[in-house]
Image (tube, coloured by chain):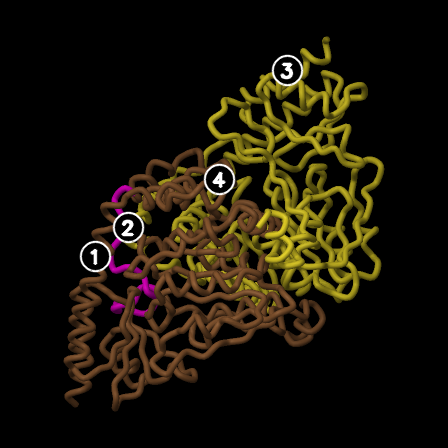
Chain colours: A yellow, B brown
Amino acid sequence: MTEDAIKASLLSELVGRLHPYVPGEQPQGERLIKLNTNESPYGPSEAVIDAIRDAADDRLRLYPDPSATGLRQSIADYYDVPIDHVFVGNGSDEVLAFAFAAFFQQPKPLLYPSVSYSFYPVYCNLYDINAETIDLHDDMSLSLDDYDRPNGGIIFPNPNAPTSRAVPISDIEALLKKNTESVVLVDEAYVDFGADSAIPLIKQYPNLVVTQTFSKSRSLAGMRVGLAVAHPALITALESVRDSFNSYPVDTLAQAAATAAMKDTTWFDQSIARVINTRENTATSLVKAGFEVQPSKANFLLVSHPQIPGKTLLDHLRSDGIIVRHWDKPGLSPYIRVSIGTDEDMQLFLQSLQTLVAA
Amino acid sequence: MTEDAIKASLLSELVGRLHPYVPGEQPQGERLIKLNTNESPYGPSEAVIDAIRDAADDRLRLYPDPSATGLRQSIADYYDVPIDHVFVGNGSDEVLAFAFAAFFQQPKPLLYPSVSYSFYPVYCNLYDINAETIDLHDDMSLSLDDYDRPNGGIIFPNPNAPTSRAVPISDIEALLKKNTESVVLVDEAYVDFGADSAIPLIKQYPNLVVTQTFSKSRSLAGMRVGLAVAHPALITALESVRDSFNSYPVDTLAQAAATAAMKDTTWFDQSIARVINTRENTATSLVKAGFEVQPSKANFLLVSHPQIPGKTLLDHLRSDGIIVRHWDKPGLSPYIRVSIGTDEDMQLFLQSLQTLVAA
């Protein structure tokens, strides 16, 4: 049988319809400055490493706690919500995948920003969800007034990615006052770097779902943990979808690591402050060097230059051993997205761009 | 809004259709002899613990290798197949979930045994897959001749669960010779305890998919790793579904742990031999005590008594602090399924049953 014959006869129709997500490159073993996937430049809290080492023993023969009670309690404590408002999954991508299945297969279209997290259209394809994208304004800002229209659900990141811009909580509340008949999901992957979480609104608005990740502000991209906070009726729906797919997606060590990360608020506050400080210094230096920089509340910057195309910036940086992200897509081609690294990483990044501008 | 109103207006229709899987109880903190979820009684290899400790450092800030190259290579080496024949996921449940989506949404029905892994009908519900169950024979054996009928896919565990019985590889090959137009998935969760893997057949039969788990024979239920081996065209389809759902489901420590587990063949062979030895001794003692025991090639026994109902066996054992599994389902109600524990666990299990029989 040829490969084509195999595909035609054996695969579900679904497979032909999919447009899988393409994550940022994870080069193995190369010596590069990696500013392309919004990881933290700092390792996790020592309490996290200790928790992993303590849990790595014969107990790994047993299945994890399927309810992840300890981890969910640590999140409930941190955000001052009841534990039945908390769901955890294998990274916020898995949490989002469950949420798209549980909430967004609706007769009316799902609304999301035209420039946004590129996994959203992938989930829509996977679950055959009817969607409508809403354009950003010319300055790349997102106005929630534009979402006041018939819909089967609304999702947006706050801060938005890759624009780095945040909307104020008051705008989210204004939307929730008008939009009561469908789920509003605020994807807070980057919220800890300067925006306000919508979690306190959940007690008044039972159609609000907030997702977050341990991959960025808690330095645990390697451990794959994400969370959702919502009214228990919505959490139960997420659990039903999960338990129809995989009963234990968060492993024992991931639960231990994330619980310790949630509890070490001192480490967390310091680590966030360092990233924000580096971000602000980098943005100032970029503007001085003639670049345009979106006002960022995230752990990355969206950067452009009035004369130099985004692709040229990308290629020049790569030739200096620095990886950033660039999308050859409408609205995004002038830009590069740069994760905030250490001060030293950002010095090398700035030097590389200054050389390019000078040439 | 009442909880009912929330459910009605906000959830996808899918949620109402689901019948989530109910895994065996994972009691937290209780002192019980846990013979209910087919975990290994022995902790993982020391090489596994060392690999986890070595990998638990600042690198956890980075995303895992999305290709899991090291882990997939260790599996390829073990089974002597090319690395492009290997897929890994978050437990074999996730691998099965991806496989149902990629292969079994077909016009013709999926075939699987009426007494089998209870996650199969759950996936069929999730993906709206048309299925037909094939009855076992009266002695609980599975005959692959019964699967020679029009189908859009075939899946069965070998050994079957919870019957513990295996079919020979020659029967699987006979089926593959006749059934060339749909995927045949052999779920080998328990294969290491005495059955033969169908993996060597893959080079001749490009419609064969074999799945396995690290949760049983490799003592890593806590780490959530499963694998599939198949023709690269089928592996690519699994990757498409995965990358439309969650790009990095196997975390950095799970990759490190599973790689070390795959390489430590000495530990593996010894651990398997101990479980088999305990299983055979337990089966012999049960028969002596008047019980009926299915011939097992797995790390569990399916046990019944001519006079005592399965539910009575379950309740009596529980009152002695021993948890086993019982299903109140057609064909299964006379039985309990008992995971093989340590020799000491099984002594206590036997004593409990002997007391019941004597009473």
Residues tagged by mark 4 and mark 1 found on one chain of the structure: yes
Depth check, mark 4 against mark 1: the one in front is 1
Give the residue number, with chain letter if any, for mark 2: B44
Q: Which chain carries label 4?
A: B
Q: Quadrant of the N terminus of chain B?
A: bottom right
Q: In the shown orientation, is residue A170 left or right of residue A222?
A: right
Q: In which quarter of the image is the C terminus of chain B?
A: bottom left
Q: Give the amino acid type for the residue marked by disc 4 in the picture.
A: Pro
Residues tagged by mark 2 and mark 1 found on one chain of the structure: yes
Depth check, mark 4 against mark 3: the one in front is 4
Q: How far apart are marks 3 and 1 (CA)?
A: 60 Å
Residue drawn at (54%, 30%) of the image: A274
Q: Distance between the residues labelled 4 and 3?
A: 28 Å
Sequence-earlier tag: 2 or 1: 2
Element under disc 1: helix
Give the residue number, with chain letter if any, for mark 3: A352
**Magenta segment:** B28-47
